[in-house]
Image (spheres, grey):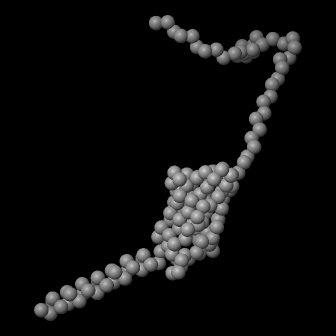
Amino acid sequence: MKTSFINRTLFGIIFVLACLQLSARTFYNGTLTGKLLDGETNEPIPYATVALLNADDNAYIRDVKTDANGSFKVEKVPFGKYKMSTTVLGYQQMQPKVVFNAVQTRVAVGQVALQPVFRTMVARTAAKQNVAGKSCTKPGMACNTAVRPAAKQRS
């Protein structure tokens, strides 16, 4: 009888502690949602990286990739102040600030328009004329050559 009472009491205490821990985990975490768009075309930006950095020291917290529609969801974010860092090749990086606390557990940044970074590339070609009166007959030199398709081999 005495052992049964102790076992029930011990089980009850463990059960209550487990429930408190689960509710604390759920309660002290936030969720960040949004969608990345091209700032000029309003097209979604798929497979971009969205990372959360600590607002004070830029320490990495966690990151996710956007889906094919440019949408993202960062879950289980501890309460605090963060920078949402977007990283996409060809677009300027953005770092809006977000805050998670007991009142604000879900933050929806909505549609975030990233501005494209244009880099103009210039192709330059140089041509040198053959020196008049000089011959290209030295071994290992080829002059005035053209690429021709290989002839079919006969079997």
Task: Give the residue at x 63% y 53%.
Answer: 42
Quarter holding residue 141: top right
Q: Position of residue 46 (x, y in %)?
A: 55, 51
In the image, residue 94 above or below residue 122: below
Q: Is residue 43 visible?
A: yes
Q: Is residue 60 visible?
A: no
**135 or 130, nearer to the observer:** 130
In the image, residue 148 above or below residue 69: above
**113 or 51, nearer to the observer:** 113
Task: Give the residue at x 74% y 41%.
Answer: 121
Q: Position of residue 12 (x, y in %)?
A: 26, 86
Q: Position of residue 40 (x, y in %)?
A: 68, 52
Task: Give the residue at x 29% y 82%.
Answer: 15
Task: Give the residue at x 82% y 23%.
Answer: 128
From this viewpoint, which residue is outermost toward the left? 1
**137 or 22, nearer to the observer:** 22
Quarter holding residue 149: top right
From this viewpoint, which residue is outermost toward the right? 132
Judged left or right of residue 18, residue 52 is right
In the image, residue 83 above or below residue 72: below
Quarter holding residue 93: bottom right
